[in-house]
Structures are given as C-alpha cells and as structure tokens.
C-alpha cells in the first residue's frame, strides 16, 4: 500500500536518491527543499518550497504522514582555533535545531499514521574522533542524542533512527572529492576501499522508513565502509 513520506532536503545528494527510491516503489513523496528542478520529473513526487534555516512554517495538506527523513547537513572543517562561535551556532542550527523544528511541525501528522518512522543523518565523526570536525561533530552528536530520546518518548507508534555515514560522493562533499586523487586517497581510508555514494545511504534510509525495520528504533547505524569499526593495517 502506498505511503506518504516527507523528505526534507530531498532535491540533492542522499535526499534525492532516497526520494527516487521511495517514488519508484510507488509511494507518495513530498520533497521540502529550496529548489525543485531535480525532482520535477519524478512521478509521484510533490515539491514544497522550504528553507531549513528560514522562518516560514512547513505546511502539509495530508491526513497522515508515514515517514520523515531530515537530510540537510553541512561540512564545516576547520582547525578548532579558527572556529568562531558563529560557526558552531550555524552548524547546530542547520543540523540539530532544524531537525527539531521539522519534527515538531510534523509530529501531529506522524501520530495519525498507524505506524511511522523518522530518519535522521549524523556522521562517523561523532563516534570516531577526527581532526577539524569539532563543530559538525558537536552538532551531529546532539542529533544522535535527540534520536535516542525521541525513540523512547515516541515509542511504540513512531520509530526514530539515525544513519551515520563516512564521506559520501555528493555535491555537499564536492570540495573534498574534487579530483580523482582525492577520491582515491579517501577510499584507501576505508576497509571497503571506496567512498560511499548516495545509493548506499538511500538504501539504508529506505529500509528504516519501511516496515522491514519495524523492530528497529533508537539506533545509530554506521553506514561508513568500515571506518568506525575496522582498523586498516
């Protein structure tokens, strides 16, 4: 049976791949993002103009919502001594408070579904200490705490899980993977000897949004090519 899914940030990168997978499976997908061009040709997708950093409310004319994925993120890599308070606040606003705002606005619709699922996105850098990641790791660490807290509070009707990827070849990471040499160097840091792609994360996101994961909640799933658990010799 077709379900209603909202993908915030679903017009680029991982969010776009997730949107395509859900729409291809026959679901009704609502993409909330600043631009619509990349999703206009996808059958079963409706675009809602929305800025995760803006003040305009997110309005959905639906009876219920079966699933929500919050995909916006940032990669703000600087030495700690160069990070300003404004950097920390900007990362926290987009990654953590943005998710909080969207979830609060969607919660009434999620509660009206028989069972619903929320998927958030963290980073391997929360559990795996990495230089120059202080700001983004702090913001995403808060998101992981939110995941577990909401999983407890919203159970049993709404499941809440989080994906924690290593670097994924998306427009967001374009500066870090701008040449073949950079891609190769990054690939060698992973046990599986490649960087991730959008489909890797979309596959996991589709699983967590679907009933196939009906007994999974409060989890931080590392989709990271082994980065967080395997040490290369």
Image: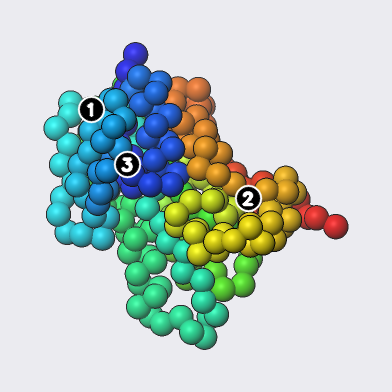
Residue placed at 40% from the left, 43% from the top? Answer: 15
Label ID, residue 38 = 3
Count how many numbered circles sit on residues in the image: 3
* 117 to the left or right of 81: left
The outermost residue toward the bottom is 81
x and y, in percent, of residue 206 in the image: 46, 31
Residue placed at 51% from the left, 71% from the top? Answer: 77
**Mark 3, mark 1: which one is toward the viewer?**
3
What residue is pinned by disc 1? Answer: 64
**Mark 2, mark 3: which one is toward the viewer?**
3
Q: Is mark 3 on a helix, strand or loop?
A: helix
Q: What element carries label 2?
A: loop
Neighbour class for label 1 at 10 Å: few (<14), some, many (≥20)? many
Mark 2 and mark 3: Cα distance apart in space = 23 Å
Q: Which of marks 3 and 1 is nearer the N terminus?
A: 3
Q: Which of marks 1 and 2 is nearer the N terminus?
A: 1
Neighbour class for label 3 at 10 Å: few (<14), some, many (≥20)? few
Q: In this view, does 139 lie above or below 65?
A: below
x and y, in percent, of residue 76 in the image: 46, 69
- Name the one closer to the observer, 64 or 35: 35
**Mark 1, mark 2: which one is toward the viewer?**
2
x and y, in percent, of residue 70 in the image: 36, 46
Residue placed at 50% from the left, 64% from the top? Answer: 175
Mark 3 and mark 1: Cα distance apart in space = 25 Å
- Name the one closer to the observer, 147 or 124: 124
- Name the one closer to the observer, 149 or 144: 144
The outermost residue toward the front is 180
What residue is pinned by disc 2? Answer: 195
* 228 to the left or right of 54: right
Q: Is residue 156 visible?
A: no
């Amino acid at each position: 049976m077709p379900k209603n899914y909202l993908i915030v940030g679903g017009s680029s990168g991982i969010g776009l791949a997730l949107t395509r997978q859900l729409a291809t499976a026959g679901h009704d997908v609502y993409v909330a993002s600043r631009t619509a061009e990349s999703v206009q040709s996808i059958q079963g997708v409706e675009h809602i103009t929305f800025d995760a950093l803006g003040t305009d409310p997110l309005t959905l004319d639906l009876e219920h919502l079966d699933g929500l994925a919050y995909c916006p993120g940032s990669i703000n890599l600087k030495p700690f001594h160069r990070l300003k308070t404004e950097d920390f606040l900007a990362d926290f606003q987009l990654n953590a408070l943005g998710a909080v705002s969207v979830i609060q606005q969607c919660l009434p619709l999620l509660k009206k579904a028989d069972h619903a699922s929320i998927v958030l996105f963290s980073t391997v850098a929360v559990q795996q200490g990495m230089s120059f990641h202080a700001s983004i790791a702090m913001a995403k660490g808060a998101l992981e705490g939110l995941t577990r807290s909401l999983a407890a509070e919203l159970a049993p009707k709404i499941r809440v899980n989080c994906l924690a990827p290593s670097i994924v070849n998306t427009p967001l990471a374009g500066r870090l993977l701008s040449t073949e040499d950079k891609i190769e160097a990054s690939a060698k840091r992973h046990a599986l000897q490649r960087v991730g792609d959008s489909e890797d994360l979309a596959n996991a996101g589709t699983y967590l949004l679907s009933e196939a994961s009906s007994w999974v909640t409060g989890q931080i799933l590392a989709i990271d090519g082994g980065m967080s658990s395997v040490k290369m010799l």
